[in-house]
Image (cartoon, rainbow, N blue to C red):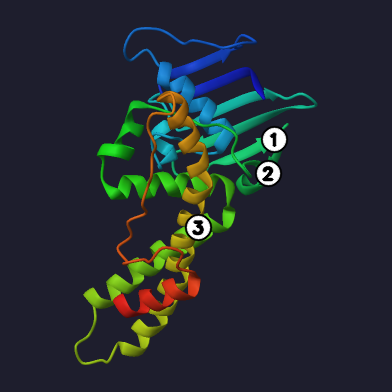
Amino acid sequence: MIVKRLVLKNFRNYSDLSWQPGSGINIISGNNAQGKTNILEALYYSANGRSFRTSRDKEIIGWNGEDSYVSTQFEGKKSSFEISSYIKNEHQSSFSINGQKERKNKIFKPGFAVVFTPADLDLIAGSPSGRRKWLDYELGSFKIDYLHNLSNYEKVVNQRNNLFKNRDRRLNISDLIGSWDEQLFFYGVNLITERIKLLRELFPYLREVVSILTDGREEITFNYLSSLPLDKGMDKKGILKLYKEIV
């Protein structure tokens, strides 16, 4: 899949841009703050339906208007298509393919662009929350169910915390907490098992790359360190049981 054309209107620092990349490898160069990363962000947005720099689409909009437009023409071996994105300040972004408005989940399933930036070094030196966020992004690009579980898990956690924070001492909230706990366990277990599954699938490739880079002199291993004391090979039932004991 190659990019044939990129059109931007009021995207970051670009008020109006039309760019046709070369057919091979393209190198974007320039001074600081000229907008090199903004072009990469626009391409990524067109390919995956989201930015790799912010979770708030309205931050993409330039200073000169209330909305932004991104259109990218892609070409494969057997087909070509154009994905257009309309980003409005106070409204949800909308997407179309070849001029026909489509649901985001239908277009970007899965996403087909990857990015590596200096910020990705935080995967090693940064906080656990940053590594979880990376896993969420990677899984969300390929598994819509994962995004559904993640969204519901975050809502349940917020509702459950608010119930504890604002509870009336005269009322017994155990029944209410119990219903939220069941949802917490369900979505939480699904998230954990999917993250572990992804890491297991990625590990053979990681091991091969490290072997190539070190000429076979070094090996790499990893451990998924959860807030739950997971045992190796634990299945969903085991994780659920452990989750209930801890929470």
Residue under label 3:
194
Q: Does residue 93 appear left or right of residue 89 in this picture?
A: right
Amino acid type of the residue that numbered disc 2 sits on in the rendered structure: Glu
What numbered label is drawn on residue 97?
Answer: 1
Select label 1 or label 3 by which is in front: 3
Front residue of this view, candidates 121 and 74:
121
Q: Does residue 207 appear left or right of residue 19 in this picture?
A: left
State the image coordinates of residue 27 (x, y, percent, origin top left). Answer: 49, 10
Front residue of this view, candidates 24 and 203:
203
Q: Residue at x 43, y 47 (%)?
A: 135
On-image quarter of the N terminus: top right
Amino acid type of the residue that numbered disc 1 sits on in the rendered structure: Ile
Select label 3 or label 2 by which is in front: 3
State the image coordinates of residue 172 (x, y, percent, origin top left). Answer: 27, 92
| Numbered label tally | 3
Q: 232 above or below 11? A: below
First in sequence: mark 1 or mark 3? 1
Q: Are marks 3 and 2 in contact (CB under 8 Å)?
A: no
Disc 3 to disc 2, C-alpha distance: 27 Å
Query: Callout 3: few (<14), some (14-19), or many (20+) C-alpha neighbours within 10 Å?
Result: some
Residue under label 2:
102
State the image coordinates of residue 116 (x, y, percent, origin top left). Answer: 43, 28
Q: Are marks 2 and 1 in contact (CB under 8 Å)?
A: yes
